[in-house]
Image (cartoon, coloured by chain):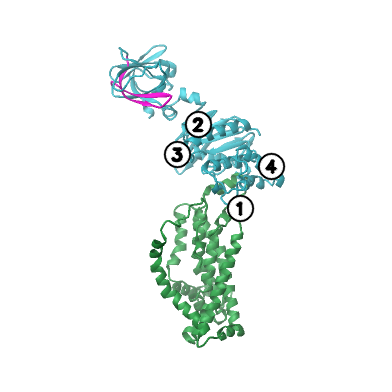
Chain colours: A green, B cyan
C-alpha cells in the first residue's frame, strides 16, 4: 500500500523532513523493519508467487485454470464488487461521523471518537460474531420482525451478500473515519466562516472549501478501506455463505483444505496485481483533481 | 463605493453565566474608522462576530444603514471581513480567492476578471494572480485577504486583529496602507485590536471594551487626554499612577497629598468621576510621562532622585523615585537645550495642574 497517500494535506506548506538524517543513519534506523518484512513477508509471498509459476516445473497451467474455470473469475469479480460497495457505504456513513468529530467541541466529540475507536480495539472476530447473533434465524432482528408482525417466518439474513456487506462496512468504518477526521481537523474553522462571509451559503461553503480540502483524507480512507475489503477473510468467511465466496476464502481453501499451494499462489498473484493496478489508477485519477497534491 | 452607518443597539451575549457582551451600544458613522480596543476576553471579538453573523446576540439589534441585519445569515449581509489568520483558501490561487465572492454573486466572467485585476492593483499585488497562498509572504497574504474582502464593494469592512501575525515594521507599513485604502474608498471599518498604539494611529474613534462592557468611546485624542476611567487611562498610552489623599478644595482646584510631604494641585474639571472627592478621601492620580517636567532641584513641592535614564532616540525616559517611594516615568524630548539630569541626581518635578486625572480609588 502506498503509504504516502496517508500524508496530511499541505494546508500551510510545511517543509519536508527528508534529508534531516544521513543515508546511513536512516538505513540503520529502518533495518530492523526491513529485516522483519523480508523474513516474514517478502520471502513467503515471493515463494508463494514463485511456486505459482515454477512448481513443479515452469508452467502457466495454474493461471490458465483461473481463466478457464468461470467460478474463479466470478469470485474475483464479486470480490471487487463487494469491496467497492463496502467502500462507498463506509464513505457515506464515515464522512458525516468524521465531520461531527472534527467540528463538535469538547466532551461530545470525545464520545463520538470513543464510539469509533472502541470497536477498532475489539477483535474483528468478536464483532463478526456479534453480527451473527443479530442476524441468525432466531436472532434479535428476526425476533423483532416477527413479533411486530412484519414477517411471518424468519428471514434468511445470515450467509447472504447483504450480511457480508453490512458486517464488513461496520468492521472497516474506523479506517475510513480516522484519516478523514485528521484532515478535517486540520482545516481551520475560519475558512468555512470566510466562505460564508464572502457570500456562500452553508452547502456551498462545504462543497467548495471543506470538501475539497478534506479530499486527501477521503482518498486515504477509501483506498485503505477498499484494499482491506479486497483481502478480507474472517468476516466474509463467517457471515457469508457459499454464494458469497470471496477471493481470500478461496485462497484459504486451496492452502488449508486442498493443499494446492501453487494454485493458491496463482490466485494470490491475480488478486495482488489487480489490487495494485486499481490503487495506482485511483491515485492517478485523484491527482488530476485540483487541490490534491499528494506525493 | 460608499460606507454605510453601523448601529449596535444594546447588544448582549452570555455564555453560561459569563456576560461576554453586556448591553453595548455604538453608532458608527458612514465612512468612519472605528476600533474596538480591549484586552483579550473583553468581548471585542464576540462583538465583531455578531456583526459578521457568526454569533447571535441574546438581546439588542444590529443595523447597517437602514437595514436590520440582526438575524440575517452571514452570507447575505454584504459585509467584508479580514480574518486574524487571513483565512485564504489554500487550494485556490490568489485570483480564485479574490474571485470567490464574485462567483457567489454570479458575476459574469469578464466582470469578475476585471474586478479581480482592479482589487489586486488596489493592494499593489498585480502579477500574483496564479500564486497559491502558501507561496506568498505574510504581508502579501494579508493584502490578498484585504483585496478579497473589498472586491465585492461592501459598505462595511470588519477586521479582526489583521496585523497580529506580522512583524513590527511590516505592521506599521500596513497600518498606513489600510488607513489610506479606507479613506480613499470611503468605506466604514470596524477594526478589532488589543494594540492601543495601532488603534491610536488608525482610528477616527476608539471604543474601549472591558469585561464585555463599553468603557469609553471617543477620538484617540479624547481618550488620551481625558480618559473616563482609570482602566482607560492605564490601557491607552503610558501613564503614571499615584495614590493620594484629598486635602481640600476651592472653586477651581483640589489639593492632594502624595506620600508624606508632597502635594499636587489638580484642576477641578479633570476629576473624572461625578462625585468629586471629599476632604480626606483616598484618590488615584494619573499623569502622562510627557506632562511632567524635570527641573534642577531647589525647593519644589515635589522632588525625587533619578534612578535611571533610558535613551529612545527622539526622547528620553527618566525613572524618578519620589520621597514616598513611588516611581514615576518622565519623558522629555531630546533637544540640546533641554535639562537632562544624570543618574542619581536629585531633581524637582513640576506637574501642571491641568494634566492630572483623578479617579476614585475603589475603581481598581
Report how far apart the C-alphas of labels 1 and 2 lie in the structure. Answer: 35 Å
For the C terminus of chain B, the image quarter is: top left
Residue at 48% in and 25% down: B223
Q: Is residue B119 visible?
A: yes
- The label nearer to you, 2 versus 4, is 4
Q: Return the chain for callout 3.
A: B
Q: Return the chain for callout 1.
A: A
Report how far apart the C-alphas of labels 1 and 4 lie in the structure. Answer: 22 Å
Dot 1, how many residues are within 10 Å of its Cα: few (below 14), some (14-19), or many (20+)?
A: some
**Does the CB distance between marks 4 and 3 fall below 8 Å?**
no
First reached walking from the N terminus: tag 4 or tag 3: 3
Disc 4: which residue = B114
- The label nearer to you, 1 versus 4, is 4
Disc 3: which residue = B41
In the figure, B84 relative to A140: above or below? above
First reached walking from the N terminus: tag 3 or tag 2: 3
In the figure, A210 relative to A74: above or below? above
Main SS class of the magenta portion in the image: strand
Q: Can marks 3 and 2 be said to lie on one chain?
A: yes
Q: Nearer the viewer, residue A140 or A228?
A: A228
Q: Return the chain for callout 4.
A: B
**Does the CB distance between marks 3 and 2 fall below 8 Å?**
no
Q: Is residue B321 magenta?
A: yes
Disc 1: which residue = A208
Q: Can marks 1 and 2 be said to lie on one chain?
A: no
Dot 3, how many residues are within 10 Å of its Cα: few (below 14), some (14-19), or many (20+)?
A: some
Q: Is residue B253 magenta?
A: no
Assign a secondary structure to mark 2.
helix
Q: Nearer the viewer, residue B98 or B249?
A: B98
Amino acid at each position: 500500500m502506498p503509504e504516502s497517500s496517508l500524508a496530511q494535506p499541505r494546508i500551510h506548506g510545511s517543509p519536508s523532513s527528508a534529508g534531516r538524517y544521513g543515508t546511513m543513519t536512516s538505513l540503520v534506523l529502518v533495518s530492523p523493519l526491513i529485516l522483519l518484512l523480508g523474513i516474514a513477508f517478502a520471502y513467503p509471498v515471493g515463494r508463494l508467487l514463485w511456486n505459482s509459476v515454477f512448481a513443479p516445473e515452469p508452467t502457466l497451467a495454474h493461471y490458465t485454470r483461473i481463466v478457464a474455470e468461470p467460478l474463479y473469475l466470478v469470485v474475483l469479480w464479486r470480490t471487487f464488487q463487494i469491496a467497492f460497495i463496502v467502500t462507498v457505504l463506509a464513505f457515506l456513513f464515515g464522512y458525516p461521523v468524521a465531520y461531527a468529530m472534527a467540528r463538535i467541541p469538547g466532551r461530545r466529540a470525545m464520545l463520538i471518537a470513543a464510539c469509533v475507536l472502541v470497536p477498532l480495539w475489539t477483535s474483528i472476530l468478536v464483532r463478526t460474531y456479534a453480527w451473527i447473533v443479530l442476524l441468525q434465524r432466531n436472532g434479535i432482528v428476526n425476533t423483532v420482525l416477527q413479533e411486530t408482525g412484519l414477517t411471518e417466518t424468519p428471514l434468511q439474513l445470515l450467509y447472504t451478500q447483504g450480511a457480508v456487506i453490512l458486517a464488513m462496512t461496520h468492521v472497516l468504518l474506523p479506517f475510513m473515519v480516522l484519516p478523514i477526521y485528521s484532515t478535517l481537523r486540520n482545516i481551520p474553522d475560519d475558512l468555512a466562516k470566510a466562505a460564508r462571509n464572502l457570500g456562500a451559503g452553508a452547502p456551498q461553503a462545504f462543497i467548495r472549501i471543506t470538501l475539497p480540502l478534506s479530499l486527501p483524507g477521503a482518498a486515504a480512507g477509501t483506498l485503505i478501506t477498499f484494499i482491506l475489503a479486497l483481502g478480507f477473510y474472517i468476516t466474509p468467511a463467517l457471515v457469508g455463505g457459499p454464494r458469497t465466496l470471496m477471493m481470500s476464502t478461496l485462497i484459504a481453501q486451496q492452502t488449508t483444505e486442498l493443499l494446492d499451494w501453487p494454485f493458491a499462489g496463482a490466485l494470490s498473484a491475480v488478486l495482488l496485481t489487480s489490487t495494485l493496478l486499481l490503487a495506482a489508477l485511483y491515485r492517478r485519477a485523484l491527482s488530476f483533481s485540483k487541490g490534491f497534491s499528494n506525493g | 463605493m460608499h460606507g454605510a452607518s453601523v448601529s449596535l443597539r444594546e447588544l448582549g451575549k452570555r455564555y453560561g453565566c459569563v456576560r461576554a457582551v453586556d448591553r453595548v451600544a455604538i453608532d458608527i458613522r458612514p465612512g468612519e474608522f472605528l476600533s474596538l480596543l480591549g484586552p483579550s476576553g473583553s468581548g471585542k471579538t464576540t462583538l465583531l462576530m455578531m456583526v459578521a453573523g457568526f454569533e447571535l446576540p441574546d438581546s439588542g439589534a444590529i443595523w447597517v444603514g437602514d437595514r436590520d441585519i440582526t438575524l440575517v445569515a452571514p452570507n447575505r449581509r454584504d459585509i467584508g471581513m479580514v480574518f486574524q489568520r487571513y483565512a485564504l483558501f489554500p487550494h485556490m490561487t490568489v485570483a480564485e480567492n479574490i474571485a470567490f465572492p464574485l462567483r457567489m454573486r454570479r458575476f459574469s466572467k469578464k466582470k469578475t476578471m476585471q474586478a479581480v485585476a482592479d482589487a489586486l492593483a488596489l493592494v499593489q499585488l498585480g502579477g500574483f494572480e496564479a500564486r497559491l497562498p502558501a507561496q506568498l509572504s505574510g504581508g502579501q497574504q494579508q493584502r490578498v485577504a484585504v483585496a478579497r474582502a473589498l472586491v465585492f464593494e461592501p459598505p462595511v469592512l470588519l477586521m479582526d486583529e489583521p496585523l497580529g501575525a506580522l512583524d513590527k515594521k511590516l505592521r506599521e507599513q500596513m497600518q498606513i496602507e489600510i488607513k489610506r485604502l479606507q479613506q480613499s474608498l470611503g468605506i466604514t471599518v470596524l477594526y478589532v485590536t488589543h494594540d492601543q498604539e495601532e488603534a491610536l494611529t488608525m482610528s477616527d474613534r476608539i471604543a474601549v471594551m472591558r469585561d464585555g462592557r463599553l468603557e469609553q468611546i471617543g477620538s484617540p485624542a479624547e481618550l488620551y487626554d481625558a480618559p473616563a476611567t482609570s482602566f482607560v487611562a492605564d490601557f491607552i498610552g503610558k501613564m503614571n499612577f499615584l495614590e493620594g489623599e484629598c486635602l481640600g478644595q476651592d472653586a477651581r482646584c483640589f489639593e492632594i497629598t502624595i506620600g508624606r510631604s508632597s502635594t499636587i494641585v489638580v484642576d477641578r474639571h479633570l476629576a473624572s468621576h461625578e462625585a468629586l472627592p471629599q476632604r480626606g478621601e483616598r484618590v488615584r492620580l494619573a499623569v502622562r510621562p510627557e506632562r511632567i517636567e524635570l527641573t534642577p532641584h531647589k525647593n519644589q513641592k515635589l522632588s525625587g532622585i533619578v534612578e535611571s535614564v533610558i535613551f529612545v532616540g527622539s526622547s528620553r525616559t527618566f525613572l524618578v523615585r519620589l520621597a514616598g517611594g513611588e516611581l514615576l516615568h518622565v519623558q522629555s524630548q531630546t533637544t540640546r537645550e533641554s535639562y537632562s539630569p544624570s543618574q542619581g541626581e536629585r531633581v524637582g518635578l513640576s506637574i501642571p495642574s491641568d494634566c492630572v486625572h483623578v479617579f476614585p480609588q475603589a475603581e481598581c
